[in-house]
Amino acid sequence: MHQSASAPDACDVAIIGAGLAGLSCAVRLCETPGASKPTVRLLEATDRVGGRVRTDHIDGFTLDHGFQVLLTAYPACRELLDYDGLNLQSFDPGALVRQNESFSLLSDPWRRPLEIPSTAFNPVGSISDKLRIAGLRHASKRGSLDELYHRPQTTTVQRLQADGFSKRIIDQFFRPFLGGVFLDESLRVPSRMLEFVFRMFSEADVAIPAAGMEAIPKQLAHRLPGEAIELNRSVSAIEADGVRLTDGRKLLAKTVVVATESGAAARLTELSSLATDWFGTTTVYYAAAKAPNHHKRLILRGDDNGPVQTAAVMTNIASKYAPAGQHLISVSTKLSHHDDIDKLDHSLRQTLTHWFGESVASWRRIQVYHVPYGLPQLSLDPVERSVRLRVDSPHPHLFVCGDHRETPSIQGAMNSGLRAAAEILTCETPSH
């Protein structure tokens, strides 16, 4: 990855932001066969690629910034990623739900038929609720993803209520589960996201790379020419013939792609309509000498009213997330960046002790991540999927991509990058 000022001052395509959207766009452009392959510069303001998909390695522990997972059914991921190369470690289907002072298994009977009895007769919702889950699963798999994105919309909670789900299963399963996915337990997100998530969860695995989620953007970056990525390069303005960097350097570019989060995209393009509100989360990581359970599933709060929304014993899924003889527990709660960390820790431990026993007192807090920009919020309006900006743009060939242009997900980020690349390749981009 190039970081000096010696890179050429002109290119065919300048991409602002080396998150998953920008990387996916760059990979597709750089791997275009034939002599018409455009030259690409990927400008990243920070010291590493990945955007919001980041991982720290501290004292032998692998700590993703927030609880993040890869749904291997994502079409864009299947198209671009080498799953074997990522050494994916899979969760077991379903979840453990805290209910009546214990944990109940709510599994996927289509993928784990032997777990049908324990799922059907546990206290998490009624038999009718579980049959309605089967109906929701079936509805989510109808038609193409593009058709799903354009179905009539309501909020997720209104859709669940209209489908006849009981208040109990909405509050004790859907709110913590989908709240962990959407980062919004109010379930105000559009119902298309409910169907999108159910479709993806039902078709393949939920997994994490053995080396952490950052292995995903790193794998994409390693496919690019060494001079294509410039780290610590912040863009101050988009101009008619290229981009201006904060260090004063001008990079000429026939085409500019804005692959940043929505707020930065709005500022750079001078189009306030691109801005979105955000959902956030706080994730706390603990180290333990002994795992609190052996399950490879997400743990949901269910009927517990404490601050823990979801938890997972990460080393049950990927043993290399911790050094030998240690275990790593991820605990997610609502965004708490204005709270005292020690008070937050004490409050979480009270709930965790209720769940797992007195051994929680010996757990060592490793790191706390406040993620205010977790996922962009979507409205109930149809998805604005266009990646080319044609009105009031500061550059005649300006594109924008990111999960705010599709679905708030890894799929949305990567697929929007692929769509931007496809449109760019239909235009003439002669070399300078």
Image (tube, helix red, strand yellow):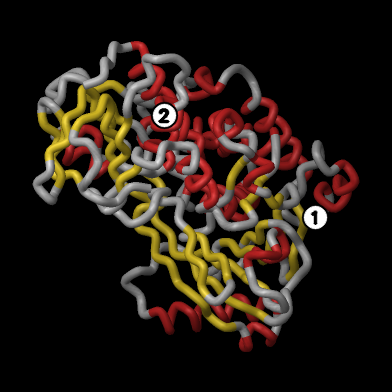
Image x and y of residue 123, in percent: 76, 56
In this rendering, position of residue 219 left or right of residue 124: left
Which quadrant of the view contains residue 197?
top right
Determine if residue 8 is in view. Answer: yes
Location of mark 1 (residue): 122
**Which is more foreground, mark 1 or mark 2?**
2
Mark 2 secondary-structure assignment = helix
Image x and y of residue 43, in percent: 28, 42
Q: Nearer the viewer, residue 98 or 11?
A: 11
Q: In the displayed structure, would residue 168 be above or below residue 220? A: below
Image x and y of residue 104, in percent: 76, 60
Determine if residue 413 is in view. Answer: no
Instruction: Tell me which residue sits at (62%, 76%) in the image.
Output: 352
Location of mark 2 (residue): 416
Which quadrant of the view contains residue 427?
top left
In this rendering, position of residue 53 left or right of residue 13: right
Q: In the displayed structure, would residue 34 be above or below residue 345? A: above
Which quadrant of the view contains residue 431?
top left
Instruction: Tell me which residue sits at (43%, 41%) in the image.
Output: 20
Mark 1 secondary-structure assignment = loop
Q: Nearer the viewer, residue 6 or 322?
A: 6
Going from the N terminus, do you reach mark 1 or mark 2 first?
Answer: 1
Amino acid bearing label 1: Asn
Instruction: Tell me which residue sits at (10%, 26%) in the image.
Output: 240
Residue that extends furthest to the front in the rendered view of this protein: 6
In this rendering, position of residue 6 left or right of residue 278: left
Image x and y of residue 46, in percent: 31, 55
Label 1 vs label 2: CA separation? 41 Å
Which label number is shown at residue 88?
none
Q: Quadrant of the C terminus?
A: top left
Q: Nearer the viewer, residue 322 or 65?
A: 322
Instruction: Tell me which residue sits at (54%, 51%) in the image.
Output: 215
